[in-house]
Image (cartoon, helix red, strand yellow):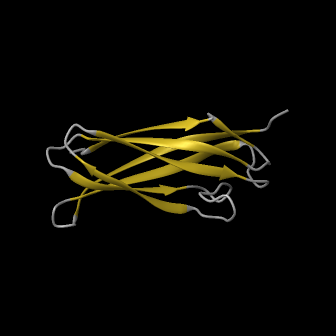
């Protein structure tokens, strides 16, 4: 049974290749279950991009908060390109964890979003 519905958006819609720039990833998480869940989202990016502007960070966690049934919460994170960001489609892997009242993981949902990176002419 799925406890979360995850939707993603990028702004701007693409990274520029071979230069320092960034996109903002918006993550919307809806609790489709019957219980409120304390929620975290793990974000994993490939080595050509980073979650930090000044160093290589491929994995991070976002504390989303307590999501009640049928409620939607939105969080944002930035993804940074650099001189080693070549034109390609980059898989951005998201794993959302839901914790119950006893702090045990009671729900987990995975999603992969594709980030476009293109060369500007």
Residue 40: horizontal and vertical position, in percent?
35, 57
Apparent side of residue 92 relative to residue 94 in the rendered image (left or right)? right
Looking at the image, residue 24 lies above or below residue 97: above
Q: In which quarter of the image is residue 33?
A: top left
Closer to us: 67 or 81: 67
| Quadrant in the picture for the N terminus | top left
Apparent side of residue 73 relative to residue 62 in the rendered image (left or right)? left
Q: Residue furthest right?
A: 121
Looking at the image, residue 27 lies above or below residue 57: above
Residue 109: horizontal and vertical position, in percent?
33, 50
Looking at the image, residue 22 lies above or below residue 70: below
- Total labels drawn: 0
| Quadrant in the picture for the C terminus | top right
The residue located at (58%, 49%) in the rendering is 78
Closer to us: 75 or 13: 75
Apparent side of residue 87 relative to residue 103 in the rendered image (left or right)? right
The residue located at (18%, 50%) in the rendering is 36
The residue located at (66%, 51%) in the rendering is 80
The residue located at (79%, 38%) in the rendering is 119
């Amino acid at each position: 049974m799925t406890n979360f519905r995850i939707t993603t958006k990028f702004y701007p819609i693409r990274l520029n290749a071979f230069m320092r720039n960034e996109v903002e990833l918006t993550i919307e998480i809806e609790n489709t279950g019957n219980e409120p869940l304390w929620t975290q989202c793990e974000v994993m990016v490939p080595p050509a991009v980073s979650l930090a502007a000044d160093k290589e960070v491929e994995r991070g966690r976002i504390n989303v908060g307590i999501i009640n049934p049928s409620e939607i919460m939105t969080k944002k994170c930035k993804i940074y390109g650099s001189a080693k960001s070549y034109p390609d489609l980059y898989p951005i892997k998201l794993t959302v964890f839901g914790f119950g009242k006893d702090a045990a993981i009671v729900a987990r949902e995975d999603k992969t979003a594709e980030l476009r990176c293109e060369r500007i002419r």
